[in-house]
Amino acid sequence: MQIILFGGPGAGKGTQAQKISQFYKIPHISTGDMLRETTQEKSPLAHKIKEIMQQGELVSDDLLKEIVGVRLEKSDCRDGFILDGYPRTLRQAHDLEDILKKSQKKIDMVLYFKVHEEELIRRLSQRGRADDTLETIKNRLSVYVSTTRPVLDFYQEKGLLYTVQGVGEIETVFEKIKGVITGICALS
Ligand code: B4P
């Protein structure tokens, strides 16, 4: 089962990905986590990535293609994976198609967590990560609207998009996700 989790910053992708990963025993692949890990290194590239993330901008498509391509080749992805935070641009959506074609895999579903902007701001302001300052949150939201949200149409046209109401208790959202996954698996 190959799943993409999609939604605005703070929509709960990382939170739900962990739960899906535990329940369905497939790896959680978070590009945000992988990039944050890279920023711990002492190199000009690591410094550049850190700067981009702290501004709430997106890291380059080429670098993401490289990172995701290498990760999806690992043996733990053989029976499926959860992509959390990728793709975030139309170019990344096309890059992912290339990556998957090489390994003869396909995406089964894109789960879109619908959460309104006030709630996203509320959650991120409470989380307190380095890129959760009000100024950065506002920029991340504007990048999401201008650059990431168009990716929804790409998957809608492919018939892969499923919307999950992302507001409510974490467990309640997870129950809804399980319902969607069960429904899709029953169809295939
Ligand atoms: P990410 O690490 O992907 O983070 P995110 O979008 O902010 O958060 P997510 O949706 O996972 O929310 P979470 O579950 O944590 O991205 C960070 C940065 O990395 C990007 O801005 C970008 O610079 C870079 N990046 C990543 N991928 C990239 C790509 N593909 N291309 C280029 N750049 C990339 O939840 C947030 C908070 O809400 C938590 O505190 C959680 O406890 C809470 N919460 C979750 N569900 C809740 C619920 N139902 N009710 C109440 N609170 C809830």
Image: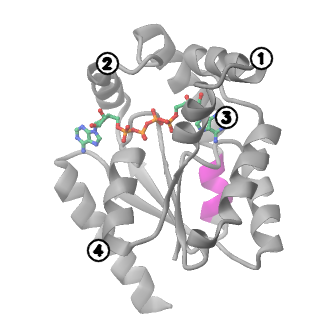
Name the residue carrying label 3: 147
153 on left or right of 90: left
Give ligand 1's quarter of the image: top left
Q: Distance of mark 4 from mark 1, alpha carbons?
A: 45 Å
Nearer-N-terminus badge (2/4) = 2
Residue 52 in picture, x, y percent from top left:
66, 19
Name the residue carrying label 4: 179
Q: Are marks 3 and 1 in contact (CB under 8 Å)?
A: no
Mark 3, residues whose alpha carbon is within 10 Å: few (<14), some, or many (≥20)?
A: some
Mark 1, residues whose alpha carbon is within 10 Å: few (<14), some, or many (≥20)?
A: few
Question: Which residue is pictured at 39% across the width and 64% down the height?
Answer: 21
Q: Residue furthest top?
A: 135
35 on left or right of 127: right
User: Eyeballing the image, is 82 above or below 41?
Assistant: below
Q: Which amino acid does the dot numbered 2 rest on?
A: Ser
Q: Which is nearer the eye, 120 or 32?
A: 32
Name the residue carrying label 1: 44
Name the residue carrying label 2: 125
Nearer-N-terminus badge (2/3) = 2
Q: Are marks 1 and 2 in contact (CB under 8 Å)?
A: no
Is residue 130 in the magenta section?
A: no
**Which stretch is magenta?**
151-156
User: Eyeballing the image, is 188 above or below 156?
Assistant: below
Q: Which amino acid does the dot numbered 4 rest on?
A: Gly
Q: Which amino acid does the dot numbered 1 rest on?
A: Pro
Q: How many marks?
A: 4
User: Eyeballing the image, is 125 above or below 185?
Assistant: above
Residue 107 in picture, x, y percent from top left:
62, 71
Q: Distance of mark 3 from mark 4, alpha carbons?
A: 30 Å
Nearer-N-terminus badge (3/4) = 3
